[in-house]
Amino acid sequence: MRNIYDLTLKELEDYFISIGEKSFRGTQVFESLYKKRLNSFDEMTNISKEMRKKLKENFSLHKIKLLITQKGDKVNKYLFELEDGNKIESVLMFHNYGISICVSSQVGCNMGCTFCESGRLKKIRNLLAYEIVEQILLIEEETKKKITHVVVMGIGEPFDNYENVLRFVKIINCNKGIDLGSRHITISTCGIIPGIKKFMEEEGQVNLAVSLHAPNDELRRKIMPIAKVYQLDDLMNTIKEYIKKTNRRVTFEYIMLDGINDNEKEAKELVKLLKGINCYVNLIPYNETENIGFKRSKEWKILAFYDILKSNKINATIRKEFGGSVDAACGQLRANN
Ligand code: SAH
């Protein structure tokens, strides 16, 4: 049985048309789910009993299960159990500008980035759209607060699960539902070129972030196996094409690994690589995990790296840190605890 949280507004309208009803019934149900947050078809009293019965026969309203909430300083971590018993995590961050959620898009991840905890468990399966949507619904229910920003930066590679992730975006972006503005949604990829190409054809203003982490192929291949599949040259050309086509600025994520990619040499190479591109660089102090040997760059090196970018007119920020207290920081999420 299809989960109703997996349907876009259009599909719900089409469903009602297919059973001989008016399409606005679809809108009513969509609003019941996302505006009123009703948790059963019986409560949807603005549609007939018969229609409710049909919905019950055709759709499941089952939600994934929130197992554990860990509260830290300005950050919460959530562990969910899916219907098949797999587990995923998401992270909620309280900023001064709003509340952002970092959602997972897969159970496990196949990208194998050497520094990332999430990738130590190979991909078991893709998440369906409803399993990503429900991370938002359940967390809003738990916190009684409205989430204002979404980043698809939890466990998984979103462009290795393209259709479901884009379906998720469509559902939460819809103004008859959760109504999260596309400019408040960011998808982060390790650099899957065919995904970026498809993404530039999509409507809307969803942000793209690319995990770069190294300014040349040799180094990138050492820490990110995906770099063996997609060369940096091709990746950068695709990104330039993306910017030209969409007029949108791209974010580059660059984790700072002590002695690996944080030297003056790499900073200068990065300047060369990004010169003239409409982008900004997010320098991420590496979060150490007990299972992986990399160390976080020294603070002075992060600042020196940042200065080189800035003095060469590359927009950059050093990522504010979240989540360390509850192991919820980037790369610390695990698929199966
Ligand atoms: N697969 C996607 C999204 C998930 S990872 C991607 O690669 O972009 C989200 C971000 O966290 C990526 O930039 C990733 O490289 C980074 N990250 C992974 N492990 C980290 C760690 N231990 N410390 C800091 N950032 C990390």
Image: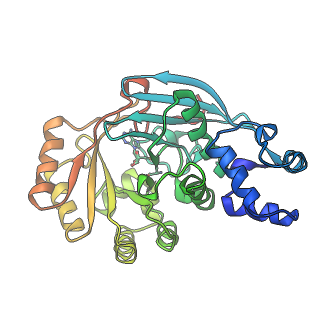
Residue 311 appears left or right of 195: left
Q: In which quarter of the image is the C terminus?
A: top right
Q: Residue at horizontal 30%, vertical 56%?
A: 214
Residue in the foreground of this view, choosing between 15 and 158: 15
Percent x, y for residue 317?
Answer: 23, 48
Q: Is residue 47 above or below residue 193?
A: above
The quadrant in which residue 246 appears is bottom left
Q: Residue at horizontal 47%, vertical 67%?
A: 196
Residue 124 visible in rendering: no
Residue in the foreground of this view, choosing between 74 and 274: 74
Q: Residue at horizontal 73%, vertical 50%?
A: 29
Q: Is residue 136 above or below residue 144?
A: below
Residue 101 appears left or right of 317: right
Residue 185 visible in rendering: yes
Residue 239 appears left or right of 26: left
Percent x, y for residue 252?
Answer: 32, 57
Percent x, y for residue 80?
Answer: 62, 32
